Amino acid sequence: MTAATMHTHETDEAARDVPAASRPGDDRAARFIDVRGLEKTFAGDGAPVHALRGLDLVVPEGSFLGVMGQSGSGKSTFLAMLGGLSHPSAGSIAVDSIDLYALPGEKLADFRREYLGFVFQSFNLVPYLTALENVTLPLAVKRMPAAEKRARALDVLERVGLADRGGHLPGKLSGGEQERVAIARALVNQPPLILADEPTGALDSETTGEIMDLFADLHHEGNTIVMVTHNPEIQRYFDRTIVLRDGRLACELPACASDTPV
């Protein structure tokens, strides 16, 4: 049984309206993320902007996928669409055999809450809430006792090495500590899929290594992670790295040409 299919009862509730998959369980794990013909076009000043152009991608469960490419290559657009935040102009995205954009709005929101953990470069922490309160936020809609929510949040703060910093406001934390809080917040719902957008972009090299070691631990525990980055130095942490260019899948490292811009 895959980690995703072992996920919480709430996840099953979120996907209840989605037709049951007919594929065997091992194939579901092999095609945990299934992207087909993905396109995204934005209206520009006088001309449309083609952010993604027919992207096809399959990601097995438990992968640590790096997504690289120059600015404007479509990396962040792809991550937003994978996270159910931006409808495609064409094509489809399925996660654990759930067709994301076939879900009605409320069910798509349920899917994001139960299946996904987001980690952002800018941390996106609420400045007037403590680290513990920020981590507890995703549990606000959960039907569980407040003491259980607090205990779960404390547990993930300990997991990221911040057991003694839960009472601090974000402004009293270092950049690396704020990123750890953001990771803890992404983990508190125990999601099968973690999406990270440039999580080390604002950190120094030593702190970057610490954060990437934390992501590596999460990967080794079986989590599926998709990370967008500009930093070629962290590519060694990924078990697979794709390079986007002009909204298309240009190549996959290490098979890319030596002059491929990343």
Image (cartoon, rainbow, N blue to C red):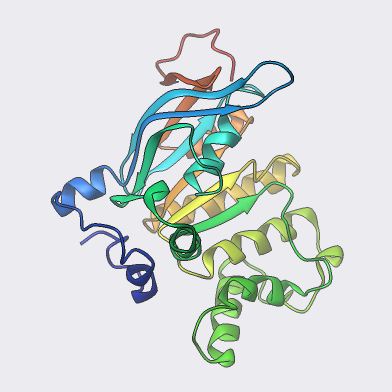
**Left or right: 233, with 122 as reference point:** left
The furthest residue to the front: 46
x, y (%) of residue 31? 27, 42
Q: Could you tell whether 181 is left or right of 159 in the image?
A: right
> What residue is rendered at 86% in x and 66% in y?
172
The residue at the point 45 percent across, 14 percent down is: 256
Write the residue at 60% across / 85% down: 150
Residue 200 versus residue 187 in the image, above or below: above
* 124 or 161, nearer to the observer: 124
Q: Position of residue 54 (x, y in %)?
A: 42, 23
Identify whether 130 is placed above or below 4: below
Q: How many marks?
A: 0
Which image quarter is the N terminus in?
bottom left
> What x and y, as percent, mark residue 242?
45, 27
Residue drawn at x 63%, y 20% is 48
Using the rendered view, name the quadrant where residue 170 is placed. bottom right
Quadrant where the C terminus sits is top right
User: Looking at this view, is 44 or 200 the one in front?
Assistant: 44
Residue at the extreme right of the image, as rendered: 171
Q: Position of residue 220 (x, y in %)?
A: 40, 53
